[in-house]
Amino acid sequence: MEKLDLTKTFKEYYSAKPHAELVDFGEIHYLSIDGKGDPSGDGFALSLQALYSVAYALKFYYKAKSLDFVVAKLEGLWWYDEVVYKGLTVDSAPTSVPRSEWFYRLLIRIPEYVDGDVLTLIIDKVFTEKKILLAKQVAIIKFNEGKVVQMLHVGSFDREQESLLLLQEFMRQHGLSRNGLHHEVYLSDFRKTPSERLRTILREPVK
């Protein structure tokens, strides 16, 4: 039985150049969970636990149906209250908004055949057997970001501003403006990888 690996099937989605470029990927299906707070805090860790627990339970369910798949890379959408924190730009927001005030939507891309009714069964299983309360907040979402400006950032999250400045300049030069939430694709496992070796795709939806 061949296992579906979305990272290989959609290689262009999981790759980026070390300089800004304009791309468009169309509609994509994800598992998601929302939260707020410092990504080094307990709340974020519990959100991760719930999302991965459901993702792997789905994987094993479909494996038994001969539709096995590799659990894809973690992604995240990030935003803040733009009424409270006014006038910030793509590159200035990370250092101007306290980490505790960021909202996030964690994502894992899933095959289009994953069914909402099956997800409900899996969530109940994870909730009942593993006592993971946040599993109830995991959902399937589908969205199309449209055009995005992206680049590969290599290094710690604390240094992302360097890459975001390049994205901001690219947007300025091409007359583009923000059109959605800041998007990160974590090519490295940040729980295990030294910070200087982290590889993260940074995306900004634009119009």
Image (cartoon, rainbow, N blue to C red):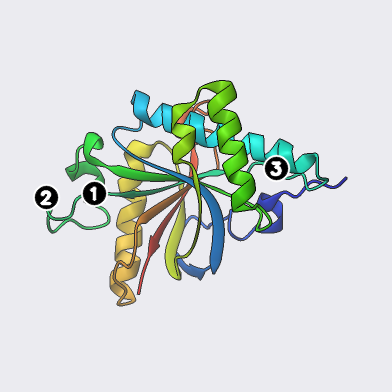
Q: Which residue is under mark 3?
A: 70
Label 1: how many Cα within 10 Å (few below 14, some 14–19, many 20+): some
- Residue 78 in sight here: yes
Name the kind of residue labelled 2 in the image.
Answer: Val
* Image x and y of residue 20, in percent: 43, 62
Q: Position of residue 50 (x, y in %)?
A: 50, 32
Identity of the residue drawn at 43% across and 66% down: 148
* Quadrant into which the C terminus falls: bottom left
Q: CA distance from mark 3 to mark 2?
A: 40 Å
Query: Up-down: is 91 above or below 94?
Result: below
Left or right of residue 68, residue 88 in this image? left
Mark pair 1, 3: CA separation: 32 Å
Residue at 11% x, 50% y is 84
Q: Which residue is mark 1?
A: 80
Residue 84 tag number: 2
Residue drawn at x 56%, y 25% is 128
- Confirm or deny contact between disc 1 and disc 2 (CB under 8 A): yes
Quarter of the image where one finds residue 170: bottom left
Left or right, 141 with reference to 95: right
Q: Secondary structure at mark 2?
A: loop
Tell me which residue sits at (30%, 65%) in the image: 169
